[in-house]
Image (tube, rainbow, N blue to C red):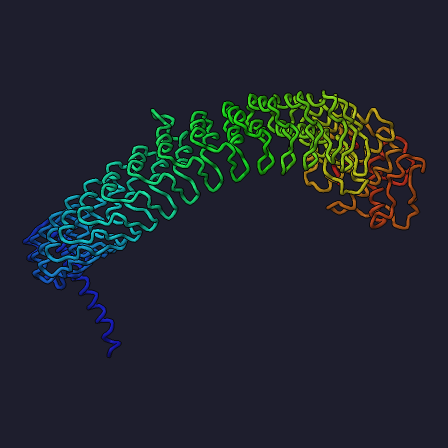
């Protein structure tokens, strides 16, 4: 029976809800039109006056529109006065936000919750205060609302009124005995907000109401600090007159005076000084007001009429002119780094220590050099500063002047006896090293003329000449090479010419070679300059070295120069000849250059170097499916003119073809003769041939089948050539070669 009545009950419920929705929709349409008669007639037939349509009840719509009579009618019909909307705003809060005081009164008369909170925790009083509705706030207060109830940010209505700068609302709330110092979640009080915003009238009213002037927020800031930070002098004066302490420091140990100077509020700073604040209180970095004033002098004060007025006032108040921060920087250090001669002289007149040293070991003379002030450098030296004092890095006053290219100061220091051979502690750099690194040619010339050591190395073994080669300064290199005292031999693991080649400095390399440097000298890795140039793919450098007679065939225990050109020292010896590697990287320009050099060599060297390009082309043919377009035809035109002796080059090509068959990705046809065929396995060229040592033993191959296949292809290649002693063994024509490898076709056509 229950199962039989179930569907019918659901249908009845659905019809009932549908009927209610239609009735409420009609009622809301009438409310939107403010049609009281229609609302009256429809409400009489409505089954549920609190049924929502689109999440709003009829009373909520009437309150939002401010229709007072309709609200009264709906309340008489039983509408729920404390129902909340989707945003958790109750009807009274909505009326207070909109400013409908009559509607709010009606809702309160019908038992609306006067302290209800919305989704942000705001009460109707918060809404009225935020929007400046004094009458609604008065009505709420008269009806007994909680004047101190905070919202979700723990902000009381008084704090909200102060933020909106509404003195009338502040007076209203204070007259209803609100808490004057009620803080928010950051412990910020209404007095702090008023002081930070510069609301002088509200500050005075809060002070009159008994606001605590020494109260601090979570960061330790007082109301006076807020006013000082924003530069409101009138508020600062009012708070100071009310007894505010200017020496209270924040959690970061910032004082009001330091904050005023840091924010460039000079008038506020004078106000604080007039109140008798402590002029030597430092922050947690140990920075005093004097040091702050000097450090901000260049940044903020330069455009003012009297930028040193604040510093003069601090000096008049007998501040400590030697009070340094935790880095050891004193006011004299700071003024010297700023290059301020007058201020530095003023500090010295008030007892500043000229021998002060910071935590890095820098003296005030170092600071003056950093500030590029020749007058200060001269003044400090005349007052007795040691010109050769080294800081913790071992740097004298020469170092900053060289780096900044201030030649006037550098020249003056050298004339005053600065040691030009001192080395700093970390890298053992001399002033000459520093000048070369900074490309300061004037300083380099000055040091050389003053007799500095030209060959002193640093910790990495770099001499000044070696450093100049690394930096690529050919003018300095020429200047050093012109000195008889400059050594022309390598005393370290790195050679100047190799360094110039490594960094690609053509002009420097040319200066070195013209200056008598051995262009075939090997470095610590047993590499010659031309080998290094090849390994770095620097064609112009190779051309330059060859032009000056570098030995192209210089053989070391590493490789031939062209092996290095491709960083290929790990390959077997037979796969590391020069042209092989040049062809692999398709550097046509380098190939042309090298072949021109090979044409001037003996026949043995030419043939030895022709082995490489053949192997290179075969290797590329076997590993590139797009071989004809992968290798430019200009490569073949470079190699083929050298193949003038077919009987001499035969063993080389035989080896290449065998290598090709072993690594070929496509299958080859079966050998043209059985394995038992009496084919000679000995070398087909005389033992006295200069190429015999290059030809590997046949045991290198994995099987005789590969060897026979190599002979097969070789016969296809040369069957149409000049008289060939083995041509009768291979009665095959040339066209089948095109099936095996396009490379051999190209070679045959050539």
Q: Nearer the viewer, residue 146 or 340?
A: 340
Asked whether 709 or 474 is in front, the reply is 474
The residue positioned 73% from the left and 27% from the top of the image is: 542
Where is residue 174 shown, x and y percent of the image?
16, 50
Q: Quadrant of residue 505?
A: top right
In the picture, measured across the screen, residue 139 lies left or right of residue 631, that is left
Q: Is residue 707 above or below residue 649?
A: below
Q: Quadrant of the C terminus?
A: top right
Q: Is residue 693 above or below residue 14?
A: above
Residue 176 location, x and y as percent? 13, 53
Q: Between 108 and 300, which is closer to the camera in this rendering?
A: 300
Q: Is residue 528 visible?
A: yes
Q: Is residue 308 above or below residue 214?
A: above
Looking at the image, which residue sits at the far bottom? 1
Residue 401 placement (x, y as % from top left): 56, 27
Q: Is residue 613 visible?
A: no
- Left or right side of 583 for 702: right
* Left or right placement of residue 320 versus residue 531 in this view: left
Question: What percent of the width, then of the height, locates residue 136?
Answer: 12, 50
Residue 488 figure quarter? top right
Image height check: is 35 above or below 646?
Answer: below
Q: How many marks?
A: 0
């Amino acid at each position: 029976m229950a199962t039989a009545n179930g569907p019918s009950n659901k249908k009845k419920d659905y019809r009932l809800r549908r009927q209610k929705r239609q009735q409420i929709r009609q009622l809301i349409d009438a409310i939107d039109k403010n049609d009281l008669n229609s609302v009256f007639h429809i409400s009489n037939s409505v089954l549920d006056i609190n049924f929502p349509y689109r999440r709003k009840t009829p009373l909520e719509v009437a309150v939002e529109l401010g229709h007072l009579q309709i609200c009264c009618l709906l309340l008489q019909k039983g509408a729920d006065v404390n129902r909340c909307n989707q945003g958790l705003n109750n009807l009274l809060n909505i009326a207070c936000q909109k400013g409908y005081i009559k509607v709010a009164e009606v809702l309160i008369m019908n038992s609306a919750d006067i302290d209800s909170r919305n989704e942000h925790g705001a009460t109707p009083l918060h809404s009225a205060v935020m929007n400046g509705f004094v009458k609604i706030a008065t009505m709420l207060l008269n009806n007994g609302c909680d004047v101190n109830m905070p919202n979700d940010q723990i902000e009381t209505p008084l704090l909200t009124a102060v933020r909106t700068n509404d003195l009338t609302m502040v007076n209203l709330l204070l007259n209803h005995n609100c808490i004057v110092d009620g803080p928010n979640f950051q412990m910020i009080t209404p007095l702090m907000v008023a002081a930070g915003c510069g609301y002088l009238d509200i500050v005075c009213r809060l002070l009159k109401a008994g606001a605590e002037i020494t109260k601090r927020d979570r960061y330790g800031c007082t109301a006076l600090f807020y006013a000082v930070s924003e530069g409101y002098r009138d508020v600062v004066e009012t708070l100071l007159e009310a007894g505010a302490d200017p020496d209270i420091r924040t959690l970061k140990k910032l004082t009001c005076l330091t904050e005023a100077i840091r924010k460039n509020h000079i008038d506020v700073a004078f106000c604080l000084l007039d109140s008798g604040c402590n002029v030597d209180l430092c922050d947690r970095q140990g920075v005093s007001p004097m040091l702050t004033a000097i450090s901000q002098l260049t940044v903020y004060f330069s455009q003012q009429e009297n930028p040193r007025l604040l510093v003069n006032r601090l000096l008049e108040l007998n501040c400590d002119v030697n009070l340094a921060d935790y880095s050891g920087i004193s006011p004299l250090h700071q003024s010297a780094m700023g290059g301020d001669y007058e201020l530095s002289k003023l500090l010295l007149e008030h007892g500043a220590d000229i021998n002060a040293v910071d935590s890095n070991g820098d003296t005030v003379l170092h600071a003056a050099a950093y500030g590029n002030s020749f007058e200060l450098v001269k003044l400090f030296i005349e007052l007795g500063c040691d010109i050769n004092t080294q800081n913790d890095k071992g740097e004298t006053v020469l170092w900053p002047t060289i780096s900044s290219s201030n030649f006037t100061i550098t020249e003056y220091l050298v004339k005053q006896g600065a040691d030009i051979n001192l080395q700093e502690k970390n890298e053992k750099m001399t002033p000459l090293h520093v000048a070369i690194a900074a490309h300061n040619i004037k300083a380099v010339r000055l040091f050389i003329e003053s007799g500095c050591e030209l060959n002193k190395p640093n910790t990495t073994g770099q001499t000044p000449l070696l450093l100049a080669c690394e930096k690529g300064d050919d003018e300095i290199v020429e200047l050093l090479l012109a000195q008889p005292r400059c050594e022309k031999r390598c005393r370290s693991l790195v050679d100047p010419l190799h360094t110039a080649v490594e960094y690609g400095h053509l002009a420097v390399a040319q200066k070195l070679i013209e200056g008598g440097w051995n262009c075939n000298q090997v470095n610590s890795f047993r590499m010659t300059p031309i080998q290094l140039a090849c390994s770095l793919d620097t064609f112009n450098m190779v051309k330059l070295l060859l032009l000056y007679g570098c030995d192209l065939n210089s053989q070391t225990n590493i490789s031939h120069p062209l092996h290095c050109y491709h960083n290929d020292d790990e390959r077997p010896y037979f796969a590391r000849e020069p042209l092989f590697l040049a062809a692999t990287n398709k550097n046509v320009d380098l190939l042309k250059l090298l072949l021109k050099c090979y044409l001037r060599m003996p026949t043995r060297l030419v043939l030895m170097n022709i082995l490489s390009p053949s192997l290179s082309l075969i290797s590329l043919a076997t590993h590139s499916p797009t071989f004809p377009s992968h290798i430019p035809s200009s490569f073949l035109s470079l190699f083929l003119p050298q193949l003038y002796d077919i009987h001499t080059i035969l063993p080389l090509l035989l080896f290449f073809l065998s290598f090709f068959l072993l690594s070929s990705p496509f299958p080859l046809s079966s050998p043209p003769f059985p394995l038992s065929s009496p084919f000679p396995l000995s070398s087909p060229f005389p033992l006295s041939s200069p190429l015999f040592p290059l030809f590997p033993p046949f045991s290198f191959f994995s099987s005789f089948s590969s060897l026979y296949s190599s002979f097969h292809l070789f016969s296809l290649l040369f069957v149409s050539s000049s008289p060939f002693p083995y041509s009768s063994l291979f009665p095959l024509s040339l066209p089948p070669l095109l099936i095996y490898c396009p490379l051999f076709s190209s070679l045959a056509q050539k």
